[in-house]
Image (cartoon, rainbow, N blue to C red):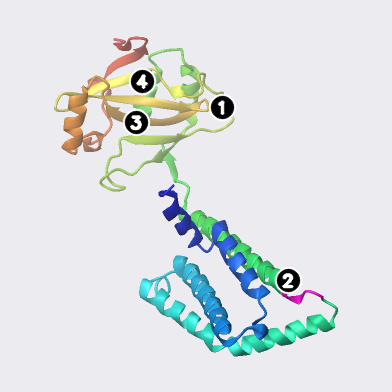
Amino acid sequence: MAARIPNALRSVADSRSVPNLVVTAAATAALTLVDPATLRPGARFAYRAANAALAGFTTWTSLRRADWPLGALPMRAGVTAGAVGATFGVAEVGEALDARLQSALLRGGVTRPRVLLAAAGVGLLALGWWGDRHLAASDDTTAEAEEFTEPESVEVPEPVRGLVSALLGRTEHFGAPELRAQLDAARANLFEGPDGPDGFAAGIGFEVPEDLPLAVPADANFPVVARYRPLDGRTFEVYLTVMAGRLSSLAISEGRDWTDAEQQEWFEAGRGAHELAGWPSLDEIEWCIETSTGLRPLD
């Protein structure tokens, strides 16, 4: 129960959250239902202080998502203090306008003008809340669209094409004929390695025309695996992934015959496939196939 309280408070402090709308709408309605003209001096001061507190709360929560400098804590505090002071400063003018509006409603035949004013205030508040939330969602969508760019496809690099072709040529099963046809028409999406765009990445993606026959199984790692030992005699595996019946990616990972201790040792030393300089040549590969008991050599 106690753990939920901070989460609830954070939600109320978010100007775009439903709890924030509920709290501010309830406070707005409660204050609007009060007729300030009927209040004694002490009660009127409390009424004005409550309105100022609501203005401060609304300002503070609204600036929570603002960019710098408005979103900076000192600026938020200053603007919030200004809003509180301004609310006190215009209180008499606001109460005079409130009295005139209430009188006009009574003359117009409204029997409970405070209820109507409260409903109108809550309605305007909800409309503003919805508009702010909708605009924020549109801005987020636009920003994501601007930030995201489709990776540029290139010709499949020859070392990759030769490696995939040799891998698919080791069997006629598992959709290999369809995947070979896809490889002939495929283009590649290059991944960025740890050394930047000019370095080697131990993976590459494929783009395949949609009109080509699909492989079955549609979603799996192709069971033929290329195994080799490029670093300190440790095994690494090159495997081909198929998704939705199409070539998806080719990648290199640490061998599955590593013990947990070996994995941990390399992890703590910061070592792994990111150290590789390039794709393996065909003459250093041992071809294996997945079986119910693990990898089995093909050659």
Principal SS element in the magenta part? helix
Which residue: 46% across, 58% down? 9
Point out the residue furthest to the right here: 109
| Residue designated by label 3 | 251
Res 51 seen here: yes
Task: Count neighbours of disc 4 (C-alpha within 10 A) and say few if under 14, some if 14 to 19, many if 20 or more.
Answer: some
Rounded to the nearest angstrom, the CA distance separating label 1 from label 2 is 68 Å
What amino acid is found at the position of numbered circle 4 in the picture?
Ala
Which residue: 16% across, 31% down? 265
Q: Which comes sooner in the sequence, label 2 or label 4?
A: 2
Q: Magenta segment, which residues?
A: 111-115
| Residue designated by label 1 | 212
Image quarter of residue 36: bottom right
| Residue designated by label 4 | 166
Q: Between 130 and 226, which is closer to the camera in this rendering?
A: 130
Q: Which comes sooner in the sequence, label 1 or label 3?
A: 1
Q: Position of residue 247 (x, y in %)?
A: 46, 28
What amino acid is found at the position of numbered circle 1 in the picture?
Leu
Q: Return the mark for residue 115.
A: 2
Give the mark toward the camera: 3 or 4. Answer: 3
Q: Which comes sooner in the sequence, label 1 or label 2?
A: 2
Q: Which comes sooner in the sequence, label 3 or label 2?
A: 2
